[in-house]
Amino acid sequence: MENKLDSILKSDVANEQTAIGFMIQDERAAIEASRLLQTKYFYTPHAAYIFKIIRSAIDEDKSPSEILFKVQSISDEDWEDLSKEIKTNKGDYISKCMSQSSIFLGSTVAFEGLFEKIKNQYIRRNLIDCYQEQIKNVMNTACFDDIETLADKGNQSVSKILDETDKTEIVDFKTSILETLNKKHEKGISTGFKSLDEIIEGLKTGKLITLAAGTGKGKSAFAVNLALNVTSQGYTVAIWSFEMGKDEVNNRMIDIKTGYSVRNESKREERYNAARHFFDNTNDNIQVFTSKIKTLSNLYITCRRLSRKQNMKVAIIDYLQLINLSVFSSQNRTREIEYITNNLKNMAEELGITIIILSQLSREHLKREDKSPRLSDLRDSGSIEQDSNVVLFLHEPDVPQNQESYKGIKRLDMIVAKHREGRTGVVPLEFKASITKFREVEEENKNGVIYSSQK
């Protein structure tokens, strides 16, 4: 008859097989496992060996198909040498792992919960061994240690087991302060707008920036301008565009760089020649994606691959309210936005990139006498403000346009409404709609417009 311990170990083995199946078939699961798990957490040598292969493959940026190939390429001799007690066919084992996890594939919650369970199983097995040893010691009447000493030894053993998996690092206070003092001040990537850089100190790694505006106010156009400014400094930029197709985004880039609008048929040849000259002589790299984001796992994988292989430092999502995750299809929209912004914030920190999310403003600000946007106007959730390091508003001020307005140049303000690490302020911009190009208002052209920068 199967005892309780045998039942526990049988369950541990089944969970390990399901976890391995996740890692083989789901790239995000493999990445998360390599971050959360250690080889020693696995009970069976077969699972531990496969995990080592998977973690090594993830470090080398291998694809799921390459990972599966590596696992399937384990020699029969090596497989048999893993355990003389446990006899299992390699192909049958791998197939079982994959079939047990197949119904949960695509669920981040499922594999993260399972990986946490793998770690807890390891702790439990160690605690069982520890308590069994304590029972043996306590039952040994010939032992010269008194009961208090035995209890103290037992407590130390338990604490050691729990400390082994606790990754909380306790650092001496003075050491922590000195480390902070000795860190060099991080210089962010330039936005291409000098006054904006002076306020937010450029685009810094690990930061989440929100750019919000009302419908048709130019936030998508500004994002393209920003991408071109960043990539001209030698960095790759990724844009997820859900309203514009790839050709429309590309045409905006061409318009900005050549100064000729795609709609200007009379300048078609000049536009073509100028575009060929520029793009034939540049290493600029902007990756444009137009497929809707259904899972954050796929977004994470793409960002991770681009950041590691193509020096991608900035990811732009246009725009937040058009993301509808499949796992939240019937749940509260506010909760979904909170989940998205929190994960994007963590993603930026982990990958060492800047993530810029475009966001719609609610229409409430249009009902006010002062239509300048406020943080409370961010649509759908307070988490947008909470999780963002910087919040920018693109706003058309209620002031007379300057003398350039007859040339199709519109005056817009970039309002830095939140800056967690510094000051806020307003940067006046000019927007030439015909070629969707932004430029900073030059000092002599401000015509009485005050540039403000409040503490």
Image (spheres, rainbow, N blue to C red):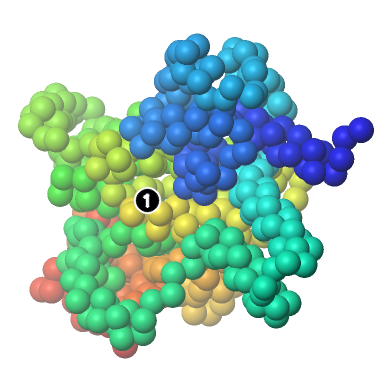
On-image quarter of the N terminus: top right
Task: Decide if residue 98 is on the left or right side of residue 318.
Answer: right
Question: Residue 400: x and y, percent?
Answer: 31, 72
Amino acid under label 1?
Leu
Task: Decide if residue 277 is on the left or right side of residue 250.
Answer: left
Q: Residue at x 25, y 55 (%)?
A: 438
> Do we see residue 318 in this rendering?
no
Q: Which residue is mark 1?
A: 351
Task: Decide if residue 164 is on the left or right side of residue 252.
Answer: right
Query: In the figure, 388 relative to 309: above or below?
Result: below
Question: Residue 51: x and y, percent?
Answer: 50, 33
Q: Residue at x 33, y 53 (%)?
A: 353
Question: Residue 104: x and y, percent?
Answer: 69, 33
**Which one is nearer the viewer's eye here, 190 or 318?**
190
**Which one is nearer the viewer's eye here, 308 or 386?**
308
Query: In the figure, 267 relative to 403: above or below?
Result: above
**Which one is nearer the viewer's eye here, 299 or 191?**
299
Outermost residue on the right side: it is 1
Question: Residue 155: x and y, percent?
Answer: 65, 71
Other-residue count near label 1 (Cα within 10 Å), few / some / many at <14 / 14–19 / ≥20: some
Q: Residue at x 10, y 27 (%)?
A: 280
